[in-house]
Structure formats: structure tokens, C-alpha cells
Amino acid sequence: MKKNTLKMAAISLAVVTLTACGGGSDDSNPEQAPGPLSKYEGTWSPGCDGENERQTISFTTLANGTKLGMNMQNEFFNQANCTGGIVATGTYGPPQPAATVTYLETVANASVRLPNGQTIQASVDRVSTAGSGASFAYTGSGVQGTTVISGKKYWRIAYGGGSTLINVNDASGTSVGALLLLNGELLELEPITSNYYRVISQQTR
């Protein structure tokens, strides 16, 4: 089986706007309100792909929450449904972070098409994402080396009952998109127009 995964340039973000609360009378050390992207900090995953693969994305707050450092990890399990031991782990190397996400603006009352076909109205954060140029590599007992197909580098990963070829893009290029926090899920959004988006992935902490 051959497939592509972890396409860095596809990342975009959108969410409900935070409202900062002040308090106290000590002006000598005022608390700084969290930036618009602070809400995304943490580790997110869409869960097991139903076969042997699980991907996680981690965000770290930068520049007082106006930027995020982004990294990815990909794990292959020996058995289906992400069970058994982990036979391969893929990560981006230096320079770190693998990509930087920068806040552009909040789009109020944007139309968002959910995976079930329903369209809702929400305030979303438009962002740009720029890769650092880092390369992706796998380690583990299931890694059987690399091969080049049509000019692209593929990793061969073996697991119980089979193997797969994985092409992972370098963390390069730039893109613009959005994300939305909805019912505890982080929704990655693709812009169709300036005020209309569709969900291309769902992830939970």
C-alpha cells in the first residue's frame, strides 16, 4: 500500500474569539491578555486511522499568542486499530519548530461546512503557516529503509501482516487557512471564499 501523509502546507486554523478579563488595582505588574492563538496550545490528534497509523500535532504558544510553533509526530502500530507495540515513529528534525503559524485576523460570522453537510456560522481565526524546511524521518523496528518513486522519497514501514510506503513532505512552503474550536474539537478549515470554509480534519486533545 502506498499513501501520502502529513502534508504540512495544508494546515490552517479558526476559532471563537477570546475575551480577556481584567481585575485588581495593582498596575505595576498587569496581567497580559492571552493572544488569539493561545487557545490552540497543546497536543491534538484525529485518533487512529482505523488501520495502523496515528498522527499527532502539537502547538506551542509564541509571541504572546499571536503565533504558534507547530510540530508533528506519526506512529505506526504492529496491529490494526493502533494496537500492539509501536514499530515506527516519525518526527521532523531541525530547524524547530517545523512550522510557524501566524495570526492574520478573526472572521466573524463565517459560514463553516461540517463533515455531516451542515453549515454553521462561527467566528474563525485566519492564519498563515510557514514551514522551516525541516525533513521528516522514521525510526523503529519496523523501518525498512527508503526508496525513491517518481522523484519522491518514500519510507517503507513493516507491521504485523503487511507493510506500507509513506511519503512525508518536508516542512516547506506557506499556506493560508483557518481552524475552529467546536465542542472540544479542533477543526482544520480550508477557505473556499473569504467568508466560507469547509472542514478538512477533526482533532481532539
Image (tube, rainbow, N blue to C red):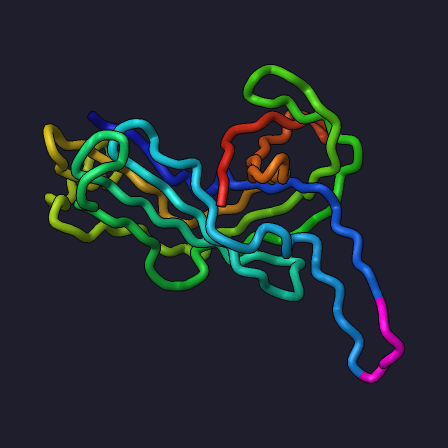
Picture residue at 17% right of the left edge, 38% below the top: 78
Residue furthest front in the image:
24
Q: Position of residue 108 (x, y in %)?
A: 79, 36
Q: Position of residue 162 (x, y in %)?
A: 12, 29
Q: Is residue 33 above or below residue 144?
A: below
Q: Is residue 198 above or below residue 133?
A: above
Q: Position of residue 201 (x, y in %)?
A: 50, 32
Majority SS type along the magenta span: loop
Q: Position of residue 21 (x, y in %)?
A: 82, 60
Picture residue at 63% right of the left edge, 40% below the top: 181
Foreground pick, 35 / 10:
35
Q: Is residue 62 above or below residue 87?
A: below
Left or right: 149 with respect to 124?
left
Was residue 26 drawn as part of the magenta stretch in this picture?
Answer: yes
Foreground pick, 14 / 2:
14
Residue furthest top in the image:
117
Q: Which residues are magenta?
A: 23-28
Left or right: 69 with respect to 180?
left
Which quadrant of the view contains residue 92?
A: bottom left
Which quadrant of the view contains residue 187?
A: top right
**Quadrant of image for the N terminus:** top left
Q: Is residue 201 above or below residue 168?
A: above
Q: Is residue 191 visible?
A: yes
Left or right: 39 with respect to 115?
right
